[in-house]
Image (cartoon, grey):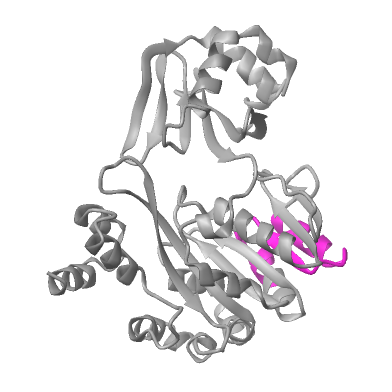
Amino acid sequence: MSDDFSISRDLLQDLIALVNSGQTFSDIHIEPDMPIMLKTPRGWRQASDEPVALEDMVPLLRGIDEDWEDKIIDHAIDRPFVLTQFRLRCNVYRTSSGSKVAISIRRLPLHPIPLEKTGLPGYVKTMLEPTKGIILVTGPTGSGKTTTMASMLEHINATRNAHIITIEEPIEYELRRKQSIISQKEVPVDTASFSSGLREALRQKPDVLMVGEIRDFDTADTLLHAGESGHLVLATMHTNSAIGAITKLLGFFAPEQRQQRAAILANALVGVIFQSLLPDENGDDFVLASELIFNTTQQVSPYIADPEKLHMISDFLRRKTDNMSRSLNDVLAQLVVKKAINQKDAMRAAYNRLELHEMLNAKR
């Protein structure tokens, strides 16, 4: 952490107090002449009534990036830094036609949490047993994908002799060597892009690859090649369902290429984890709801290999034939019945609301 933080003690102390307060929130928003805002399970709320002055923000901005004034003219600044027991991902950006600067901060634990504490079922660990293939972690922004991915990598790190290479923008959890060699690459500092980082990594003797996000054809194509050729590849995407991740991945390819790539994905896919964070029934904490597709026994492969049959994965999830794959609505309905979440929040999180409504009525 930069010595510049010592100049503005008040804002630094506010941040330290907030991140260590024990309050449940994921993000902090700071802008001039407004109170600090916190993203809680029930939405944004003020941390206090006191507005933040621009002069209080300047030392924090310098601590994030000494050249922030020059860089912010061209683009937003994304930088992590450690504050006490947390790692903060800071995004600095301009607003109001360039007249204001705001800071968006995501609070993360300093170290990955155990996989069993993420809210995912314990048997998710079996997804990490293969030495090759593709695992997709998907969901909307703020659904905990980064936390899940870090926990999965840490599980591999603690249980397998492997070389783990990550390509991230920015590096959010710092992994330390246990049983595995760790190489964490940051875009654009250590490599120009996700796709170039992934291509470079294939020449660096990896066993496990992690791609922070699949954004383009090159990354998707290289990922399929890596998963098919003997590497375990983990990647995140932004979609609203597990099936949506498969559809989006194949959608990066032109129609004439899609059939071939679908056949590769059908053979290489280990599983998909879709997740969503909801407020608990009291609104005091977050509850994880997940949709899981396991393809470890190639049960889903026939539906992926033929893109016209992708929709049949929904029926596969409803049948629950493998005891591990499960639909989001099944999980949401169970959480409502257990009174872990309320019905209104469950309906908001569902992508098939009519089906969930019928399921909840049937359980009454």
Q: How many marks?
A: 0
Instruction: Give residue 254's quadrant in the image.
Output: bottom right
Q: Which residues are magenta?
A: 194-221
Q: Is residue 182 above or below residue 121?
A: above
Q: Is residue 145 above or below residue 170?
A: below
Judged left or right of residue 39, residue 262 is right
Q: Where residue 230 sits in the image (x, y, percent)?
A: 77, 79
The C terminus, quarter of image = bottom left
Between residue 222 and residue 344, name the one nearer to us.
344
Q: Residue furthest right?
A: 204
Q: Could you tell me which residue is drawn at 53 percent across and 32 percent down? A: 105
Q: Where residue 149 sits in the image (x, y, percent)?
A: 60, 57
Is residue 337 shown to the viewer in this render? yes
Q: Where residue 296 sits in the image (x, y, percent)?
A: 58, 83
Q: Residue furthest bottom?
A: 302
Judged left or right of residue 162, residue 14 is left
Instruction: Give residue 5's quadrant in the image.
Output: top right
Q: Is residue 100 above or below residue 189?
A: above
Between residue 274 and residue 62, name the one nearer to us.
274
- On whether residue 321 falls in the magenta region, the answer is no
Q: Could you tell me which residue is drawn at 72 percent across and 21 percent down? A: 67
Q: Where residue 184 sits in the image (x, y, percent)?
A: 77, 51
Is residue 253 shown to the viewer in this render? no
The N terminus, quarter of image = top right
